[in-house]
Each structure stands twice: as C-alpha cells, then as structure tokens.
Image: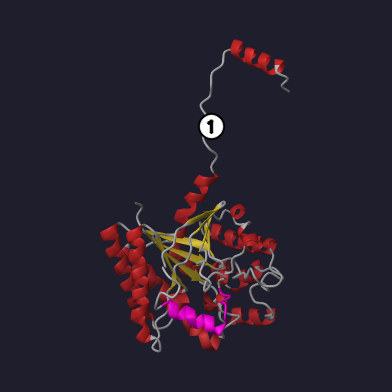
Amino acid sequence: MSHGKFVISLDFEMFWGVEDTQSIAGYGRNVQGEWQAIPRMLARFRAHGVRATWATVGAIMCRDYREWRTRRRPGTRTAAAPGACADLEDALVRQHPTLFFARPLVERILATDGQELATHTYSHFYCRDKGATPEGFVDDLARAGNLAAEMGACFRSIVFPRNQISREFLAVLPAAGIRVYRGNAQHWLYRDGDAVPGGMAGRIVRFADACVPLSGSCCRRELVDGALVNVPASAFLYAWSALARPLMALRLRRIKQGMTEAARSGALFHLWWHPHNFGVNLGANLAMLEEILLHYRALADTFGMTSQCMGAFAGMADAQAAPPPAPPRQQFSCLAQAGALSAFFREGGA
C-alpha cells in the first residue's frame, strides 16, 4: 500500500486578495502581519521537515510601486476587482506599498528547502468575473511567470483565486507549463469554490463542517485530469480568534482525524490557508500550527506518511502523457521485405 501524503498550500496574496472585500483600516494590520508570520511559518516547516506550496500573486514580486506601474497593462486588473476605480487602487498601492509588495518574502521562500513557489495569477484574477476570458487569463499568467523567472523560479502548480475553477481556464494551463492545480472537494458545500449555496446559511454550515464531519471524510485522492493533476483540498485552517476559542479543540481534532485517516489508508490530506490569516494573534496561530506539524511527524514515524508540495504530483500527468514505448524493431532481409510488398499488392493493397 502507498504511504499517505500530507500537502500544505498557502494562498500568498497580501492585500491584492482582499482589496475588493476589505479596507486598509479594517484589515491592513492582518496583511502587514505577514512580514512577521511568513518567516516564522518557514522556520516551523523547516524544523519539522514539512514541504509547502506558496501560491503567490505575481504582483507581490514587484520591487515597488514604480515597477508595478511599469508592468501594469490597461484593463487587466478589472477582472480581479470588478467595478473598482483604477485611480483608487493606484492610490492605495502607492500609499501602502508594504501591503502589496513583498519581494523579500518571496526570496525567503525560495531560499528555504522544500518550499515550492506556485502561481496565484499575477493580479488575483477571478475566472468567474464578467469579461474574464481564457486569453486574458493566459496573459495574466505570463506576467506572473516572467517575474518568477527573473527570480530563478518556474511555476508547475496553480491555486485559482477564490477557488474559481472552470474547464475553459484549466484547458490553457498545460501550454503555460503548469501541471498541477488545487481542486475543490466535490461535496456541494465546496464544489463551486467561493460560491456557497445558501448564502450566509451555507457559510455557517461550512464553518460547522470545520468542527464536525458534516461533509464526510476529509481524505482525498490525487486525480489525473488530462494533462493536469488535481490535488484536491481537504480542509481550510481557520485562524485563531478569541471569539472562536471554544471551537479550536474541535477544529484541530477534525484536522488531525483527517490526517490520521489519510496516513492509515494511503490517501491524501491537503490543508490550506492564507498567510494573512496568521497576521494577528501570531503566537496562538503558530501554536495551533505546531500541534498540526507535530501530529504529522507522529504519523510519518508510525505510518510512513510523507510531506509533499503540489508540484511533486506533476510527474503523474507527465507519465500519462508520455507515448507508449515503441515495439521492438524487427529485422527484415531485403528478400523478406520484397516478398511482403509483393503479397500486399497481389491482395489489392494501396
């Protein structure tokens, strides 16, 4: 039986990922906290031998506002922020650069063993937005890829912003060199990414599912999807908060039970969150992460569970796409070849 696999992916987006839902006053502190949270998370991953995939918004890799302005193309940001005023966005980016640009953090990720830099698109591109097209998506991915290449990195994996996945956008990934994506669980609560059936009631059920198994098992299996590999999400790691303190033990138990089930059955457990979720209450969030990582180490020692980044699954698609080996070449004498051709024509061939 194959060993279970533990996958962590982080949606590293800074304020690009929340500018359409949050304000600087209300959430800027959480994003600013990523400057402290990411080095601390990297240290814990390194200490426990844990690999992780950092799905990074490409614009974060710009050195500063000036470089971002130089790389920006008219009309490409509107898909990520529908109805947003370009002048307002420009002012926010110019006034709060440390909430939007974090090239030193990306360099730190790249310098840490076992960490994968993946793409979260360049502009936090929303595939379901009105006017979003595969052509625009390809352009957006190319800009992110160019920045990554300048830093010596190459994308093999993607996490779609807001988990908005559709077949027409998946179809363009192989040509961009991407082989792996984080898919959604097929339960109705998660199938459509950020679009939750039932609105607020559905979100409450999701929240409850993080504590008790309303949607069933969190174990997953990686799936070859044409030229791609789908590494589906198992669970979202909710941040620590004083209001939710009574639920923390239930959440951790749900995660650890899923990890244990995956380790015993040779399945996959894929945990994800955003670095800005750890931007406040950092000590409590790191303590929660430490408990999860210690549980992984116990499962690795007992069942041989392994830690994998998403890119490690790319070989599954490559293997399936490879042509079958050619049959052994047969050696024919000239006489035999002539005899075969003669028989072919006598029988009316060609």
Query: Is any atom of residue 283 visible in this view?
Result: no
Residue 290 locus on image (x, y percent): 32, 72
* Residue drawn at point x = 60 percent, y = 55 percent: 176
Quadrant of res 300: bottom left
Quadrant of res 271: bottom left
Of 247 and 181, the residue lying toward us: 247
Q: Amino acid at mark 1?
A: Ala
Q: Is residue 343 left or right of residue 54?
A: right
For disc 1, the marked residue is 326
Image quadrant occupied by the C terminus: top right
Q: Is residue 207 magenta?
A: yes
> As displayed, is residue 99 above or below residue 55?
below
Of 177 and 245, the residue lying toward us: 245
Q: Is residue 262 left or right of residue 84?
A: left
* Residue drawn at point x = 30 percent, y = 56 percent: 304
Residue 75 locus on image (x, y percent): 71, 71
- Part of the protein shown in magenta: 194-210
Of 215 and 160, the residue lying toward us: 215
Give the crowd class for mark 1: few <14, some 14-19, many >=20 residues within 10 Å.
few
> As displayed, is residue 212 above or below residue 23?
above
Quadrant of res 239: bottom left
Of 29 and 195, the residue lying toward us: 195
SS category of the residue bearing label 1:
loop
Q: Is residue 42 magenta?
A: no
